Amino acid sequence: MSEPERKSLHVEIKDAEKGIVTAAISTFGVKDHDSDLTLSGAFGDQKVLVSSYGHESWMGALPVGRGTIHEKDGEAVAELKFFMSTAHGREHFEVIKAMGDLQEWSYGFDVLETGEVSEEMRQSGVDRVLKKLKVHEVSPVLKGAGVGTRTLSVKNAETAGEVPVPKTEEKTGEFGELVGRLRDEQELSNAELAEAMDVSASDVAEILKGKSRPKLRQIDGAAEELKVSPARLRAAAEKDGHDYSEEDDARALGAAAFDAQKAAAKAEERCKSAEVEMRAAIEAKTAAEAEEAKNRAEGFQTEAKAEKERFNRNMERYQA
């Protein structure tokens, strides 16, 4: 049997009285520091051991706890219960509680199934797509490889309540929460959203965490993939404080340029029609036919002049 691999991450502590820690151990659809991208569904529901610090239980040290892993809101979440009746279990828990958001974690696993690495993924640095994993243990470590992992909260007997853990990451925000919820409801991955938004999966993760402002074209792509109105997603982004006035201006200028182009084409068409009618007037066999052709030509010339004036106005708007 091959030796299980290990992946690192941050953690969160949930209930100190019972020695319970909640850890977000993996973010789906994001390239981690090992150049792996883990898909939603890779973890499922599993039981795991908690190893002594630095995976020492693989070398014979006693495990310090046990727990389960489940998937929620685009992440793999581990609910871990430390053996508080043992000295080493209590010691590990107290260190993790004191470390707060500085504490990182790692997990040992076997790869059961891999997915296809697309050319876009490869260009963004992804070497492997993890589709199905068997996790054997999680362990506190000094430095992890996971992206978006963190300590969430701690509860202990002394305070009989939750001890908040300082967080360095930004709030997800209205846009991230809305898109994340719609993504999970439709069982989509960040990679699928990335294709629709024409960005990388890691860029999608940054946008959903509120660390990057979604552009209007990206909102349009996400809306189409999620089957919702772009206005709904834009409203959520604007609640996060994002300003789209410059992009609106650019779109208006683009529309003006397009209108100018159409007006120029119509003017050219009217000019050609006027020339045809003028030739018809010259070649007319009767005065009545000539007069009628001349009137039509003058009408086309008037329309062409109006279209040219419209073209000039639109070009002024576009170039201002």
Image (cartoon, rainbow, N blue to C red):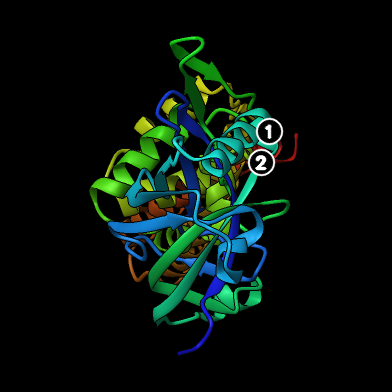
Quarter of the view holding residue 252: top right
Residue type indicated by callout 1:
Met
Q: Residue at x 29, y 59 (%)?
A: 44
Position of residue 313 measured from the top left corner of the image (x, y, whole percent) = 63, 35
Q: Nearer the viewer, residue 150 or 256?
A: 150
Residue indicated by mark 1: 99
Quarter of the view holding residue 144: bottom right
Q: Residue at x 64, y 31 (%)?
A: 100
Q: Which mark is residue 103?
A: 2
Mark 1 surroundings: few (<14), some (14-19) or many (≥20) residues within 10 A: some
Mark 2 touching mark 1, by CB under 8 A? yes
Quarter of the image with the N terminus in it: bottom left
Q: Nearer the viewer, residue 61 or 298?
A: 61
Quarter of the image with the C terminus in it: top right
Q: Is residue 75 above or below residue 211?
A: below
Q: Is residue 141 above or below residue 155?
A: below
Q: CA distance from mark 2 to mark 1?
A: 5 Å
- Which type of secondary structure does the marked residue at label 2 adopt? loop
